[in-house]
């Protein structure tokens, strides 16, 4: 009986250490992993749900994780599969990334400091606020609500091509605005 208690205690201690180790890994990469998932699904609520689902899957598969590998890259691989399954079930195939592009995004997020990602996110929010009402509504419909371009075009009595053209123009303007905002912050510091 004492042998059983000693063995159970050792297993519990090993399990606790494993849980702590996993939690530390996940805590270090959680913001980057969320950003990666958000890039794929383009909706914050879906990204929140997928981050939770991915975390559960990562924990279940943690015994198979090779410590010589990068945890973030491994987590992105799991997240990519979870996101693809999610998009497949929702029949949202509008944005399916190639494995090469997925890896490039993961590498970029891996190298970008958390403060830089937060600065970019804040600059984007500020720039969206600067848009006129119609442009902001168009961004909202297409990217936040993820309405199909055909539906948006029909609701605005426009052609899908004109909506695509407007989105292209707005993305360019937002990119320039973000760059200007980040450059002015860099000069201010």
Image (tube, rainbow, N blue to C red):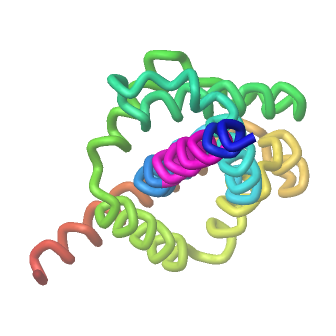
Seen in the picture, residue 142 relative to 4 is either above or below; the reply is below
Seen in the picture, residue 180 relative to 164 is either above or below; the reply is below
**Percent position (x, y) of residue 52?**
71, 51
* Pick the front one: 146 or 1: 1
**Percent position (x, y) of residue 3?**
66, 37
> Residue drawn 36% across and 24% down?
69
* Pick the front one: 112 or 20: 20
* Pick the front one: 60 or 40: 60
Which residues are drawn in magenta?
8-23
Task: Report if residue 2 is visible in the image.
Answer: yes
Residue 183 in magenta?
Answer: no
Task: Report if residue 169 is visible in the image.
Answer: no
- Name the side, left or right, on which 114 lies relative to 100: left
**Percent position (x, y) of residue 160?**
76, 38
> Residue drawn 78% across and 26% down?
85
Q: Main secondary structure of the magenta part?
A: helix
Q: Quadrant of the N terminus?
A: top right
Seen in the picture, residue 188 relative to 52 is either above or below; the reply is below
Seen in the picture, residue 118 relative to 27 is either above or below; the reply is below
- Would you identify the image quadrant in which residue 150 lies? top right
> Residue drawn 52% across and 34% down?
75
- Name the side, left or right, on which 78 lies relative to 104: right
Q: Quadrant of the C terminus?
A: bottom left
> Residue drawn 55% across and 26% down?
77
């Amino acid at each position: 009986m004492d042998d059983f208690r000693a063995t159970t205690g050792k297993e519990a201690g090993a399990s606790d250490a494993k849980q702590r180790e996993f939690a530390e890994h996940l805590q270090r990469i959680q913001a980057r992993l969320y950003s990666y998932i958000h890039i794929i699904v383009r909706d914050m609520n879906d990204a929140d749900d997928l981050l939770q689902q991915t975390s559960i899957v990562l924990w279940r598969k943690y015994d198979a994780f090779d410590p010589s590998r990068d945890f973030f890259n491994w987590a992105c691989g799991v997240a990519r599969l979870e996101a693809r399954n999610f998009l497949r079930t929702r029949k949202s195939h509008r944005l399916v990334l190639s494995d090469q592009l997925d890896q490039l995004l993961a590498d970029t997020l891996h190298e970008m400091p958390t403060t830089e990602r937060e600065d970019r996110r804040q600059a984007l929010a500020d720039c969206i606020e600067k848009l006129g009402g119609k442009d902001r509504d168009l961004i909202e419909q297409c990217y936040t609500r993820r309405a199909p371009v055909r539906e948006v075009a029909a609701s605005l009595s426009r052609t899908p091509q004109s909506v695509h053209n407007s989105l292209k123009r707005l993305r360019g303007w937002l990119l320039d605005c973000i760059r200007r905002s980040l450059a002015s912050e860099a000069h201010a510091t």
